[in-house]
Image: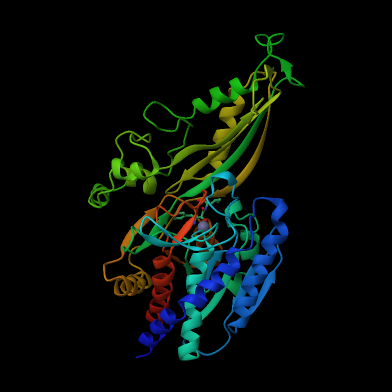
């Protein structure tokens, strides 16, 4: 039976697969930092070359920011009536603070951490390691069968970690080329080590950078403090106004479109046993800070939030400078669920800032991202096939879970390409994505590759 030969080949080729993964992990594709623009392109080129070598018609397609990798399989296919679009991203998050990494983020290695073999480096889990599981599964299928189970188009984005500004125009301009039966995305987590999962909902994201300016220069805080407005004080007051004492966000209309999760669903989540203590302990915390009266999983999977991602102003270097700064800035983001409207929430936030400013202060806003939440129906036959394949590989039933993070493409595929999306990933909560010392379990990589081979076979 050919599936077992394919799986054997994945096992035998693991060292070579890791070498191919390491080659792309060495490329510094940090999309947010313009200094790495050429490195991002080189990573895109490396994926084009890898796909072309496998026999895909692959090319790098320009956008105003970072290029997109598109590759079509035009060779033999077991079931040519099915066509899937695989999506992933080849860009990564910035690595700072660099001093908190125990090794070079772009020099991947296999290492043992807490008795578990892991692949280290920026992008190992988010998302190059996950993307390569899919590519290596196709490589093994082609090597053993000489054909793919279904038609496949691969779309790899270079801007996902920067809010995907070019993605929508790209999808609109290439809708006919990219719209297929179903999208597969490998950029999410499992439930736990050894327990696979399909992510059926993700939160949306609206980000806004805000800069408040007062005097036309920095001032002596003794000579001017008191009469002159301090933009840090104004900013702090505005940010503090955004939550009430129960952890709810205070913007008018913020909860419009947020449905209460049915009690039986909340109960099924409670049964998974992720209590505040076990959730917070691994990151060095003890007491929950979110919305009062809601469980951890409900907070992460089904409730919207407002978070402050960064704040700067005045003198922050060594020593002390008694200055009254001219400006203060913050980056604020909102995670969205249900039918919350990103545009309305952005407007409500801007209105709050403006109404709290005295006439002497001015404000500038810079938008970041803007995507609604995503959820998929539970009765899709694709979901059932993928679930069976995962269960067979891992020997335990795959769970259907939500995700607190955002992958704007799910909503974009539905809206612009009229295509459903299936999110299957092999990340773990302790992968430290977006943090120093990111890793991907070797087992995630290996069994993830085997899982995709099984899923593709099932889909045929
Ligand atoms: N892969 C993550 C999202 C994710 C993380 C999903 C964990 C499920 C579990 C993705 O690359 C990511 O980090 N997205 C950003 C999106 C933003 C920059 C628009 C996020 O969620 O902050
Ligand atoms: Zn990702």
| Residue 210 image offset from top left, x and y in percent | 63, 34
Outermost residue toward the right in this view: 216
Indicate the quadrant containing the N terminus: top left, top right, bottom left or bottom right.
bottom left
Front residue of 451 and 24: 24
Residue plotted at (36% across, 43% down): 299
Residue plotted at (49% across, 54% down): 438
| Residue 1 visible in the picture | yes
| Residue 330 image offset from top left, x and y in percent | 60, 33
Front residue of 400 and 186: 186
Indicate the quadrant containing the C terminus: top left, top right, bottom left or bottom right.
bottom left
Relative side of 354 to 137, left or right: right
Relative side of 4 to 26, left or right: left
| Residue 427 image offset from top left, x and y in percent | 42, 60
Q: Examine the image and state in which quarter residue 19 appears.
A: bottom right
Relative side of 362 to 94, left or right: right
Relative side of 291 to 254, left or right: left
Residue plotted at (30% across, 71% down): 391
Residue 242's place in the image compared with 10, above or below, is: above
Residue 423's place in the image compared with 33, above or below, is: below
Coloring scheme of the render? Answer: rainbow
Count of all numbered marks drawn on residues in the image = 0
Q: Examine the image and state in which quarter residue 112 appears.
A: bottom left
| Residue 260 visible in the picture | no
Front residue of 415 and 315: 315
């Amino acid at each position: 039976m050919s599936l077992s030969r394919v799986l054997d080949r994945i096992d035998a080729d693991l060292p070579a697969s890791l070498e191919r993964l390491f080659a792309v992990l060495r490329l510094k594709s940090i999309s947010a930092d313009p200094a790495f623009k050429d490195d991002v392109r080189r990573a895109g080129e490396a994926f084009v070359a890898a796909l072309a070598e496998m026999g895909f018609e692959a090319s790098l397609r320009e956008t105003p920011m970072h290029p997109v990798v598109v590759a079509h399989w035009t060779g033999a296919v077991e079931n040519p009536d099915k066509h899937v679009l695989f999506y992933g991203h080849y860009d990564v998050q910035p690595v700072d603070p660099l001093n908190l990494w125990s090794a070079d983020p772009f020099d991947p290695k296999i290492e043992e951490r807490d008795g578990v073999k892991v692949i280290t480096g920026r992008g190992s889990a988010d998302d190059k390691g996950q993307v390569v599981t899919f590519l290596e599964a196709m490589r093994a299928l082609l090597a053993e069968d000489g054909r793919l189970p279904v038609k496949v188009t691969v779309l790899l984005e270079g801007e996902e970690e920067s809010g995907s500004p070019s993605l929508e125009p790209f999808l609109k301009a290439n809708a006919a080329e990219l719209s297929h039966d179903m999208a597969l995305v490998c950029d999410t987590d499992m439930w736990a080590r050894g327990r696979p999962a399909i992510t059926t909902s993700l939160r949306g994201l609206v980000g806004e950078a805000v800069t408040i300016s007062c005097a036309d220069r920095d001032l002596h805080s003794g000579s001017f403090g008191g009469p002159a407005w301090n933009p840090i004080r104004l900013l702090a007051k505005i940010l503090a106004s955004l939550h009430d004492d129960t952890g709810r966000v205070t913007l008018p209309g913020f909860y419009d479109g947020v449905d209460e999760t049915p009690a039986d669903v909340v109960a099924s989540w409670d049964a998974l046993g992720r209590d505040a203590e076990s959730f917070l302990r691994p990151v060095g915390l003890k007491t929950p800070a979110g919305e009062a009266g809601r469980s951890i999983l409900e907070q992460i999977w089904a409730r919207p939030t407002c978070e402050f991602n960064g704040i700067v102003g005045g003198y922050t270097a060594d020593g002390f400078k008694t200055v009254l700064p001219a400006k203060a800035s913050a980056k604020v983001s909102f995670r969205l669920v249900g039918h919350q409207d990103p545009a309305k929430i952005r407007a409500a936030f801007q209105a709050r800032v403006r109404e709290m400013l005295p006439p002497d202060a001015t404000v500038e806003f810079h938008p970041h991202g803007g995507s609604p939440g995503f959820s998929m129906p539970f009765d899709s036959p694709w979901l059932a096939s993928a679930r069976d394949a995962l269960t067979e590989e891992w020997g335990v039933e795959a769970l259907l879970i939500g995700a607190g993070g955002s992958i704007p493409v799910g909503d974009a595929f539905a809206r612009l390409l009229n295509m459903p999306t299936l999110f299957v990933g092999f990340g773990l909560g302790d992968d430290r994505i977006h943090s120093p010392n990111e890793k991907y379990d070797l087992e995630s990589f290996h069994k993830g590759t085997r899982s995709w081979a099984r899923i593709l076979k099932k889909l045929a």
